[in-house]
Image: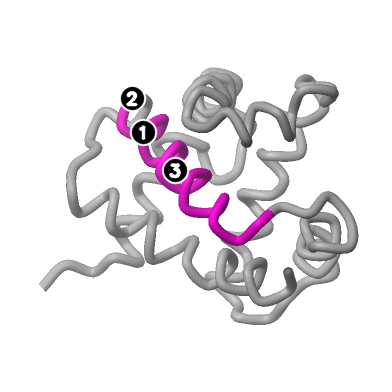
Amino acid sequence: MPNYDDIFAMSFDRVLHDGAYSPALISDFYKVFLAASPDVADKFAQTDMAAQRTMLHDSLNTLVDFFRTRVPSPQLQKLAEIHSRGAHDIPPAYYDIWLNSLVTALSRHDPEFNEAVELAWRIALAPGITYMRFAY
């Protein structure tokens, strides 16, 4: 039986080297994400993408931290608040587009990417995404 925690940890290390910034992955993610939906692209029309890429990196680490601890950090609480209906109004359905775009980017940057790696990432990010949806 696969250990998805281990599979995720190994992929995370391959792609983000234990949390290091990966410009190629982040850039590729935004190409896929913005092309996935005109509504998503509209949400980012006035966004400073250089700053956004850094925020995505930080957000990924925040979601991974929540997966590992199951304790919502102040960073996760702030991230959820920023994306909520009362702030940037990011509808919960966008998280599916976000996750699918991330998986696509990961498939291009993890040389060992396969179905088990994809599932491991989806399992790891599910608690944080659920938290974000709930805070909407």
The front one of 117 and 29 is 29
Q: Most extreme residue toward the bottom, as rendered?
A: 71
**In the image, is residue 101 part of the stretch drawn in magenta?**
yes
In this rendering, the answer to whether 120 lies above or below 23 is below
Crowdedness of circle 3 by 10 Å Cα count: few (<14), some, many (20+)? some
Q: Nearer the viewer, mark 1 or mark 2?
A: 1
Say which element carries label 3.
Answer: helix
Q: Which corner quadrant of the image does residue 131 belong to?
A: bottom right
- Give residue 13's mark: 3
Q: Relative to 66, is 32 on the left or the right?
A: left
2 or 3: tag closer to the N-terminus: 3
Look at discs 3 and 1 and give the one toward the viewer.
1
Q: Tell me, yes or no, whether the two marked residues, 1 and 2, touch with CB atoms within 8 Å.
A: yes
Q: Is 46 in front, or is 114? A: 46
- Residue bounds of the magenta highlight: 91-108
Kindly report the distance in space between the C-alpha atoms of the residues bearing marks 1 and 2: 7 Å
Question: Residue beneath label 2, please?
Answer: 108
| Residue 30 rendering spot, x and y as whole percentages | 58, 26
Q: Is residue 118 magenta?
A: no
